[in-house]
Image: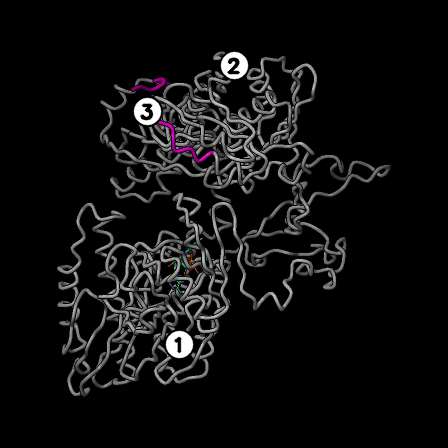
Amino acid sequence: MNDHMNGETNGDVNNVNGVTDDISHVLYDTKEFQPYDPTQEIIFPPELKLHPEWQTQNLVFRGPRVSYLRPSSLSELLCLKAEHPGARIVVGNTEVGIEVKFKNQTYPVLINPTNVAELTKVALTKGGVAFGASVTLSAVEETLRRQVNALPEYRTRIFSAILEMLRWFGGKQIRNAAAIGGNIMTSSPISDLNPLLAAAGARLTVRSAENGEREILMDQHFFTGYRRNSVRPEEVLVTVLIPFSQKSEYFLGFKQSRRREDDIAIVNAGLRVSSCGRHDRGGGGRWRSEDGPTTNLEGRCWDSSLLETGTSRLLQKLPLAPSAPGGMVEYRRTLALSFFFKFYLSVRGRLSEQFPSLVAALTEEEKEATKEHRHVTPKSTQLFQTVSYLIWGVGPLGQSPQDPIGRPLTHASALQQATGEALYVDDLPRYQNELYGALVLSSRAHARILSIDASHARGMEGVERVFFAEDLEAERNKTGCILTDEEIFVSDTVTCVGQVVGLVVAKDQATAQRAAKLDAIREKSWWGPWTIDQGDVEQGLKSSPHVLEGEMHVGGQEHFYLETNAHLAVPRGEDGGMDVFSSTQNPTLTQQLVARALGVACNRVTCRVKRMGGGFGGKETRNNSVTLPICVAASVLNRPVRIMLDRDEDMQITGTRHPFLGRWKVGVTKDGFFTALDMEFYANAGCSANQSLDVVQKAMLSMDNVYRCKNRRVTGYACRTHLPSNTAFRGFGGPQGMLFTEDMVARAADFLGMDHDEIRRKNMIDSGDVTHFDQPLDRCTIRRCWDDVIAQSTYHARREAVERFNK
Ligand SMILES: Cc1cc2nc3c(=O)[nH]c(=O)nc-3n(C[C@H](O)[C@H](O)[C@H](O)COP(=O)(O)OP(=O)(O)OC[C@H]3O[C@@H](n4cnc5c(N)ncnc54)[C@H](O)[C@@H]3O)c2cc1C
């Protein structure tokens, strides 16, 4: 390996099995890089810094729809709140912003209290730490951590639990902006802090101009309903006191969500227990528990009988109706029990350390159950063969420098993207007379459009024009990538939420998006089936010693490309020509469809793709739902029109990978050889054909995966549904088809009591086999590849370790 090279890898190359002299992991030579110069770091632009004097002054911004007020004293804040009882206080805007953007809420008066000293200070008191309601969660985190480091452990158990919870609270950016008061006042049932604050007995100070100050204990009576609490509308939350814990108290918080970080809790809990007796009994004393509104275990010993009672009382007192918001009723009840169990074990562990003669120590298995999750960043290393160069004049000693095979080539834009220098469509400079487009989307899954009232949007200042189907000749309104079964603007019947009904073109993005939120629209079948077969499936199944059946659902995924759909249509000014700057994966199709929509020849349209910003299949065809409307608008207005979708708009409009249902029936011998296989695939195509037909067929072609079976048949359906049209996604149906086969393989192995890998290897294809789509296999290396992967990944050792862990 070359010492001069970087050797940069976040994996451990020395531990990778099978690394030999001709295998390398070195991607580039760091000597080629400019040395790091800290003086070149970007600074906060001085012109954007507020003058210190303005920082402390009252501010008032009055716009046509919203007034934004920033008072600088508590008395001014209370007066403003009395004057505008409906005003919204806003600090981090991470709740209010969501209500305005996604729930179409309007708040004519917003009051920012971040200049009010009482709401921004942190004070250490006898009973705990008092945080001003506008203190950000990052500042809360910092203060609590300081206390945890400075005070005896028993005093800060509540703080430690809150710190642990804050690790899973939003992302850093959210915690830097969001305030503790905003979380409490939103009173959302999915709040991560409220269960802990309630279990801790946090005390709130609220004030109003008329009634002065009062204190509220944050207990089970504080929350009065969904997103409601006992703070009165005229009151302002001033401080939140988080108490110190006592020596005899234990406190823990738990959160379960789909993802570990930055996700909404499915269930969360704050659990506190305090001793109020002597430790003179085998179980470790008498205890009072405050685990929220659910159950009271006062006076019980901390032993297995408490666990029993606590569990059954929790079950009785968690009466989640089957229709409870959020669903997953049984799962949530089970989670609540498992939190209680984890809490019980954790406390028992602590007690056994304190009173070893009275409380039995936790077993290793029990200790494992109490461990906090710590995320370990996965490491990986890319290995490749070193390829020598051809030395001209000396002879063919190696590979031509032009031959990329075997060489690790970095992505052409990798450096620009890593440094932020890469330019995307929306980075293109604005044209002088450019307009901005925003799509008018359907809000129903299946509905006739009875009428559209766009008078409000048309009357808005800054709106140039609003386009609907009537603005385009019916024939030119038709579009679609394989079948012409879609419309640029839906004319009569919408068939999914998020279908494009119209386009507002305005002077800027904000105006266009506001006008496009029109609330004035009043508003069977499948393709296929196709079958591929080989051999005689019926006979094969009939003669098989065992026949097994099963089915499996596979969900779709959002493409989540880095750059959302961004397009700029620039009319050429002659012959109806158009230059389209698009982040499409398929410039040719875009060119063809734009030409059709404009009623011009293809050579009048140029589609330029500067950079895609990710696509993964999502911009192969679905970009056209966004590109075509702006091209129509640009052509009619003869002015450039730009659009870049917000993430939520993009997700709503563009569809995902196809969710599939796969059914299989397999005949297998007692030794694990497949004799016959019959499969059916049903793909959720969404509301139009798009690429679904090809995706289904690709799934069918991939159903053999790497296995042979003499008799097999697969039938595929692309089912039409009232959802956005699903589309290409890496693998294009292949992963779904292979997954159903792997499901079948694993279940057949389980049935026969065989090792999964043994049955896999037994049935693997080899040279001389013929696939179910009649391709003879030649030089088939799958077995060698499989054996190499097993050896290099130390698969068997890892599997044994997993099995040991799961025992
Ligand atoms: C991407 C993202 C991730 C998130 N992740 C999480 C998470 O993991 N866990 C979680 O619990 N929440 C999460 N949230 C929700 C949100 O961040 C928190 O609720 C946050 O604490 C709200 O604080 P804020 O300052 O932004 O509130 P704002 O939006 O400014 O205000 C929220 C509400 O509180 C009221 N309010 C604020 N201060 C006062 C006061 N002094 N007196 C009276 N009323 C007041 C406001 O009027 C408003 O109704 C997330 C939000 C986003 C956008």
Tag 1–tag 2 contact (CB < 8 Å): no
Name the mark on residue 130: 1
Counting from the top left corner in percent of width and height, residue 82 is at 37, 62
Residue found farthest to the right: 393
Counting from the top left corner in percent of width and height, residue 152 is at 39, 85
Which amino acid type corresponds to the residue marked 3 in the rendered image?
Ala
Q: Of residues 593 and 613, which is closer to you in this image?
A: 593
Q: Secondary structure at mark 1?
A: strand
- How many numbered callouts? 3
Which amino acid type corresponds to the residue marked 1 in the rendered image?
Ala
**Mark pair 3, 2: CA separation:** 23 Å
Does ligand 1 reach within 8 Å of label 2's beta carbon?
Answer: no
Q: Secondary structure at mark 2?
A: helix
Counting from the top left corner in percent of width and height, residue 178 is at 45, 61
Quarter containing the C terminus: bottom left
Q: Residue at x 31, y 19 (%)?
A: 525
Q: Residue at x 59, y 17 (%)?
A: 595
From this view, report whether residue 34 is shown above or below residue 152.
above
Magenta stretch in the rendered image: 516-533
Which amino acid type corresponds to the residue marked 2 in the rendered image?
Arg
Residue 208 belongs to magenta span: no
Along the polypeptide, which appears first: circle 1 or circle 3? Answer: 1
